[in-house]
Image (cartoon, rainbow, N blue to C red):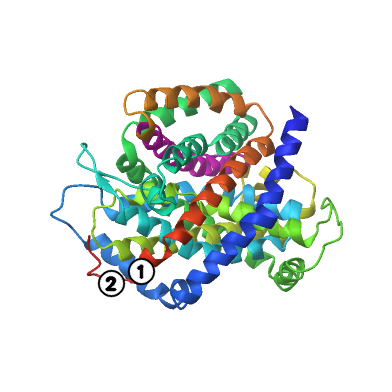
Amino acid sequence: MEPIFQFLSLANNFLWSYVVFVLLVGLGAYFSIRSRFFQIRKFPAILRSFVAFMRETSSDKRGIHPLKAFFAAVGGCIGIGNVVGICTAVEIGGPGAIFWAWIGALCGMLIQYTEVYLGLKHRVKNTSHNYDGGPMYYLPVAYKNKWIAPVICILLAFYGVEIFMFNVMADSMSVNWGVDLWIIVLGLCIATFGVALGGIKRVGEVCGAIIPVFIILYFCMSVWVLANHYAEIPNMFRQIFAGAFTAQAAQGGFAGSTVMLGISMGLSRGAYSGDIGIGYTSIIYAEGRTRQFQRLSSLTIFGLFLDTFVVCTLSVFVVLATGFWKSGIDVSLMVQESLALHFPYMNYFMPFFLFLLGYTTILAYFVVGVKCAKFLSPKWGPVLYYCYAAISLPLFAFTKAEHAFTVMSLAGALLLLLNVYGMYLLREEVVFGLDRHDRK
C-alpha cells in the first residue's frame, strides 16, 4: 500500500500548492476587498454579537440555539489538527508554514462566512421540526445542475468519518495509558455512535461544555511555557517570517524545505484544521434558530480566529520556543514534551487533551456525514454510513497517522475545489455585515 499512499501524498501536495492556493487566497482576497476587510474591521462588533446571542431567546421553536450551532462547528474545527496537524506542517514545511496558515485563515474567514450565509439562505424546513442546509442545497443553484448535490454529499460523507483524528487519539491513549488499542478503538466507536444519535443539538451541548475549558487551560499553559522561554521569542518570529519566503536548510531533525512546501503545509493544515471551504460548517449552522443570517454567519469569523490564531498558533509557538520542532521526535509528542518541561504528568494529561479535542471533532464531523447520507437515501443512507464508519475507523486506527491525514486532506481539497467555485458563482448573493434586518 505504500506506493499508493506516496502517489496520494504527491497529488495532495500538488493540489494544495498550485490549485487550492490560488482559489483559497484569490477568492478570500476578493471577498476581503469587496467587504473592505470585514473580518478585521468588524471583529469587535462580531464579539459583541456573540455575547448578545448568549442572552437572546426566541419564540421560534424550529432549529437549535445559534450558540449550540457555533460550538458544534467549533468543536469540529478545534481538534487534534490544531495540536498535531499544525506541528506536522512545521516539521515538514518549516516555521514559515504557520505564516501561511495565518494567511489562509484571514482569507478563509470570509470564505467560511460565505458558505454559511449561502447555507442559511438556501436552507429548507424538514419533517423533524428543524432545517436542512449546506452545499447540497446551494451548489445546484450555482452550477445550475443537480448532479453536484450527490457528489458533494458522497465526499462529505466520506470526509465525515474522521480517520486521522481517530488514529491519533486512539494511538495516544493506548501508548500513554498502556491500554490495548482494540479496547480503545471499541470504546471510542461506542462513544461516538451513541452521542451522534442525538444529532447536532446534542453535539453542540457536548462541545459547549468541553471547548471553552480546553481553550482556557491550553492558553494558560502555553503562555506559561512561552514566558519561561521569552529569550527565544524574537528568534522564533525571525524564523517564521524568513521561512515564509525563503527555503530553509536542514537543522537538527528538520530535513529542510522549499517555499512551496511551506505554503502547501501551512495552507493544507490550516484549512483542514479550520474546515475552510469544505461545506461542513454550513450544514451545522443551517440548523441555527435565527433569521438574522449575517449575524449568525459572522460567528464563523470568531470561530476561525479561535482555531487558527489562538490554538494553532500557541501549538507552533511552544514547539518553536522550546526547540522540539527540530528534535526529530514523533510529531504527536512535540507539544506534549514542550509542556512537560514545566508541567508534570503530561503523559497522562496530554492524551486526555487529545481525547477531548478528537472526540468533539469526530462527533461534529460524524453528524454532518449522517445528514449527507440521509440526503442521498433517507431510508438506507444512515444505516450504510454507520456500517462504513464501523469498518473504516478501526481499520485506519492501525495504519500510519500520515496516511490517514493524506486521505482526509485529499478529500478536503476536492470538496474545497467544488465548493469554492460554487461560492464564486453565487458571490452576488452574499451580503457582508451584521444587519439585524437580514431576514428570509
Residue 138 location in percent, x, y?
37, 51
> Considering the image in quadrants, where does the C terminus appear?
bottom left
Q: Residue 236: which disc?
A: none
Magenta segment boundaries in residue numbering: 347-374
Q: Mark 1: which secondary structure?
A: loop
Q: Does the rendering let one see residue 403?
A: yes
Check residue 431 in the rendering and tell me which mark sits there, or answer none.
Answer: 1
Asked if labels 1 and 2 touch by Cβ distance under 8 angstroms, the answer is: yes
The foreground one among 146 and 154 is 146
Left or right of 273? Residue 46 is left
Magenta includes 357? Answer: yes
Q: Residue at x 75, y 69 (%)?
A: 245
Give the CA separation, mark 2 to mark 1: 9 Å
**Can residue 324 be seen here?**
no
Judge depth for marks 2 and 1 and give the one in front. Answer: 1
Is residue 61 toward the left or the right of residue 162 in the image?
Answer: left
Give the residue displayed 74% in from the left and 52% down from the top: 91
Q: Quadrant of residue 38?
A: bottom left
The residue at which mark 2 appears reads as: 435
Task: Look at the image and say whether residue 435 sits in the magenta stretch.
Answer: no
Q: What's under tag 2, amino acid-wise?
A: Asp
Q: Amino acid at mark 1?
A: Val
Q: Quadrant of the N terminus?
A: top right
| Secondary structure beneath label 2 | loop
